[in-house]
Image (cartoon, rainbow, N blue to C red):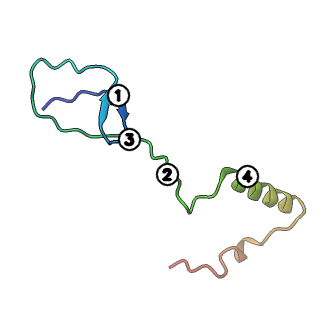
Amino acid sequence: MRAIEATGMINESGQISLDKPLEITSPSPVRVIILFTETAEDPDDESIESVKASLRRSLAEAKEGKRLPIDQLWEGIDAD
């Protein structure tokens, strides 16, 4: 079996349209592997703005001396 890389689009009906014709001289069966970027967001993911705001607050607290001793960081966390 031989591999060829091609690019294209998947339409609303789920059909693939290639950007260029394949250079295959005779009809033959194929296996197709589709690589695509998922656009749906994970509901558990925080927005970039939320993460940046949290980091800014943490940095401000650290500058104000509001820090926890390292031995207290794991308190209440089950690390089994």
Up-down relation of residue 58 to residue 5 (above or below) = below
Q: Circle 2 is placed at which residue position?
A: 40
Q: Are marks 1 and 3 in contact (CB under 8 Å)?
A: no
Q: Is residue 31 rendered to the left or right of residue 34? A: left
The secondary element bearing badge 1 is classed as loop
Q: Is residue 63 rendered to the left or right of residue 8? A: right
Q: Are marks 2 and 4 in contact (CB under 8 Å)?
A: no
**How many circles with numbers are drawn on the protein?**
4
Q: Circle 3 is placed at which residue position?
A: 12
Q: Amino acid at mark 1?
A: Thr
Sequence-first tag of 2 and 1: 1
Q: Amino acid at mark 4?
A: Lys
Q: Circle 4 is placed at which residue position?
A: 52
Q: Nearer the viewer, residue 2 or 58?
A: 2
Residue ID at (54%, 77%): 79
Cα distance, mark 2 to mark 1? 21 Å
Residue ID at (9%, 21%): 26
Other-residue count near label 2 (Cα within 10 Å), few / some / many at <14 / 14–19 / ≥20: few
The secondary element bearing badge 2 is classed as loop
Cα distance, mark 2 to mark 4? 22 Å
Frontmost of labels 3 and 2 is 3
Residue 44 in percent (x, y) is at 56, 63
Q: Amino acid at mark 2?
A: Ala
Quadrant of residue 34 within the rendered picture: top left
